[in-house]
Amino acid sequence: MNIGVIGGYKCSKSVYKTAYTVGTLIAQERWTLVCGGGSGVMEAACRGAKEAGGLTVGILPTDDERSANAYVDVKIPTGFGYARNILVVRASLALIAIDGKYGTLSEIAFGCNEEKPVVGIDTWDIKGVFKVKTPQAAIEYIRKRIGV
Amino acid sequence: MNIGVIGGYKCSKSVYKTAYTVGTLIAQERWTLVCGGGSGVMEAACRGAKEAGGLTVGILPTDDERSANAYVDVKIPTGFGYARNILVVRASLALIAIDGKYGTLSEIAFGCNEEKPVVGIDTWDIKGVFKVKTPQAAIEYIRKRIGV
Amino acid sequence: MNIGVIGGYKCSKSVYKTAYTVGTLIAQERWTLVCGGGSGVMEAACRGAKEAGGLTVGILPTDDERSANAYVDVKIPTGFGYARNILVVRASLALIAIDGKYGTLSEIAFGCNEEKPVVGIDTWDIKGVFKVKTPQAAIEYIRKRIGV
Amino acid sequence: MNIGVIGGYKCSKSVYKTAYTVGTLIAQERWTLVCGGGSGVMEAACRGAKEAGGLTVGILPTDDERSANAYVDVKIPTGFGYARNILVVRASLALIAIDGKYGTLSEIAFGCNEEKPVVGIDTWDIKGVFKVKTPQAAIEYIRKRIGV
């Protein structure tokens, strides 16, 4: 089961830590972590997942797999630039948004538009996004919504 | 010069009227109107533009050109579903958002992400979107930003 | 009605002349010419269409409308690189392939796959492509197949 | 390292067996198998890879992961229809084409266009495709070209 983690290429240490924990928990649930494959929140989440023995997928904006962060197992270069964001959403059954700027907002919007569960931690305040304060609460919400 | 009009498939009579006027003004500037080619705000804007002698482009979610509203001159079927939203943004030098739901939000997000001018009339309250109250003010803002 | 012209960025003078005539005839049929918006065959066809008073659409690989050839009316930047080829096919009711390399072959393949009429002039010899020797024969074939 | 296997949704028993062996060998090389995630050649290759302990990725035409064949580990729904073919090519460092119709031809064309190694077994006879008779020869060619 693919769960998407969305967030920016740059983030604070605190956000990095949060994203790392989200990745860890996703791996512990034995879910596959899907993301945009970049730095920042994406790297942190992949790292957390990898170090917990999970599987990570990066849907990359470039057409070169070497642009992925070091913790991506399955690299999907697209050459679409930020248009690959829609593919991150389509490849995920639910999304966890952490921090982030306009790219993350586009993913939140697509996720809500496609009626997928979208959980937010310190991110855009958009109606339809379920706001939580901790990685644990994010995972708990997705478990309920996905029915596992 | 392509100017995008983004908004929902359904809208109130009042919003329809606003979008119609936006379309009229775009045609009067001799800009090409780009949109998603659907009903609601898209139809209203195309209709306004057509009835003022303008040119309209619809980048369609389906792969069938017959799904376009009746006021689209150039029909671009994509078969991408809502993923075509990114193409509406990429095809436009600036965007006017009117009303709208999550699909519109995704376009606002992409527009801001690609650093294009985005004007909003009664739409999502997103930082970076220049809020105006009238079609005239929207056009005026774009003229200044695009430098024409 | 959109008719696509597909072919390479580089071509001989002879091929350029053929593509120019194809563009002219498309305009005379009052069809809209769709292409990838580049140089070579695409430029020649757009030029022929424009000089005969037609309407031309270029679905561009870049995200910058200034990359279009000088004879494109409606510029659709995509930022998808060669992946925009599929959009050229989806936006066309029928395709005329002239000369061309692998990019053209991908469009021929997509066109045949989507069961659209594909006419070829001095291009890849692919089963399903209707081979003709002149622009006039290409137009005639499309008229019959599209039923106009 | 991602290696793509391309071919049709339907195939003969003999082709199925060939694709199965290609999948087995890819897994034995510890490469990740990328494909369109469907039936026929795609299913056979995934099955071969899975039964040899490999990792398989399916880039799906639908937006529903349940449309993948039973041997896909990482399901990437796209909702792009056959336009997802370009993503299969972009996600692969090299391609092995087996049998196949126009969809496969589009992938061969994209692969050649992007200058990736393309090996063919009983498939379209396109200049630039390296023709081999056995799965073993296909793997051998890719090993040489990729330099592993």
Image (cartoon, coloured by chain):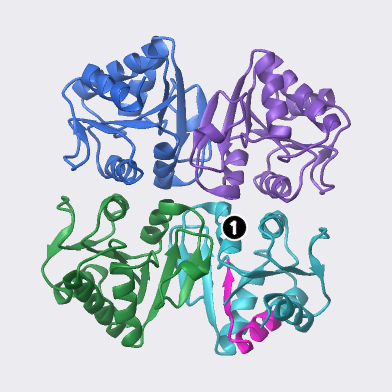
Chain colours: A blue, B green, C cyan, D purple
Image vertical order of residue A98 relative to residue A26, above or below: below
Q: Residue at x 74, y 79 (%)?
A: C144
* Residue D90 placement (x, y as % from top left): 58, 40
In this picture, residue C68 sits left or right of residue B58: right
Q: Is residue B80 above or below residue B58?
A: above
Tell me: C98 left or right of D58: right
Q: In the rendered image of this protein, does residue A108 appear above or below residue B66? A: above
Question: Bounds of the magenta span?
Answer: C20-35
Q: Residue at x 10, y 69 (%)?
A: B133
Viewer-side residue, D61 vs B89: D61
Total numbered badges shown on the rendered structure: 1
Task: Give x and y (percent) for residue D1.
Answer: 61, 24
The residue marked by circle 1 belongs to what chain?
A: C
Secondary structure of the residue carrying tag 1 is helix
Return the x and y of residue C76 as percentages of the image width and height. Answer: 46, 65
Q: Which residue is mark 1?
A: C85
